[in-house]
Image (cartoon, rainbow, N blue to C red):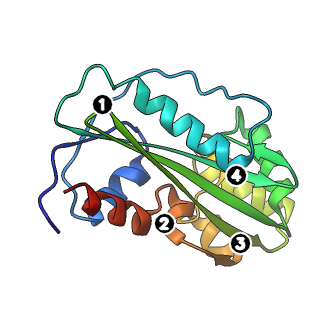
Amino acid sequence: MKSLPKIILASKSPRRQELLRLMDVDFRIVLKDVDESYPAHLSPQEIAVYIAEKKAKAFDESINDEIVLTADTIVSIDGHILGKPESKEHAKQMLAMLSGKVHQVITGVCILYKHQYNLFHDVSEVFFRKLTADEISFYVEKYEPLDKAGAYGIQEWIGLTGIDRINGSYTNVVGLPTEKLYQQLIRLV
């Protein structure tokens, strides 16, 4: 891969960090507090991109020759947006809602470079088999679903045992569509 300018990853997500490492991308983490609210009229895809752009705007005045990479992942099912659960009970409710159904995982990405915003998103369909209440409780108690949109990580136990199939990018469901990201990054240099 061509040499890239220095990259700031504006995310505390260990999954995004690991995906960038696996892509052999050098980066440093810088976090800023950003209000992640959004206008009610936006579609799920627009919400993810809107929040990713909002996160990048917090950096626009303070960077020069670095790339700022921001992302936001949401889960959408039957017209409902599932962000990160607020409690273990909320996580169980979310997983019960996903059980036996198909949902969409949408990641919005913003690459900020030289005050230019490169925005894109990816959508993956995830098919969950019917989960039992015991399986949901086991997952919520043993793993950490509170920091994940939709209350689950595809790379964890529930993803390995409860997902029948996905249509689209696996890495998008993890939290960063690396295939699209790579193409966007190499266009910058």
* Foreground of the two, 50 or 76: 50
Q: Secondary structure at mark 2?
A: helix
Mark 1, residues whose alpha carbon is within 10 Å: few (<14), some, or many (≥20)? few
Tell us which disc is closer to us: 4 or 3.
Answer: 4
- Amino acid found under the numbered disc labelled 2: Thr
Instruction: Please state the horizontal and vertical placement of residue 109, each as a whole percent of the image.
Output: 47, 48
- For marks 4 and 3, give the CA distance: 16 Å
- The residue pinned by badge 3 equals 162
For disc 4, the marked residue is 75
User: For mark 1, what is the residue?
Assistant: 30
Q: Which residue sits at x=86%, y=54%? A: 97
Front position in the image: 165 or 153: 165
Of label 1 and label 2, which has the lower sequence position?
1
- Which is more N-terminal, label 4 or label 2? 4
Residue that label 2 marks? 171
Where the N terminus falls, by quadrant? bottom left
Q: Amino acid at mark 4?
A: Val
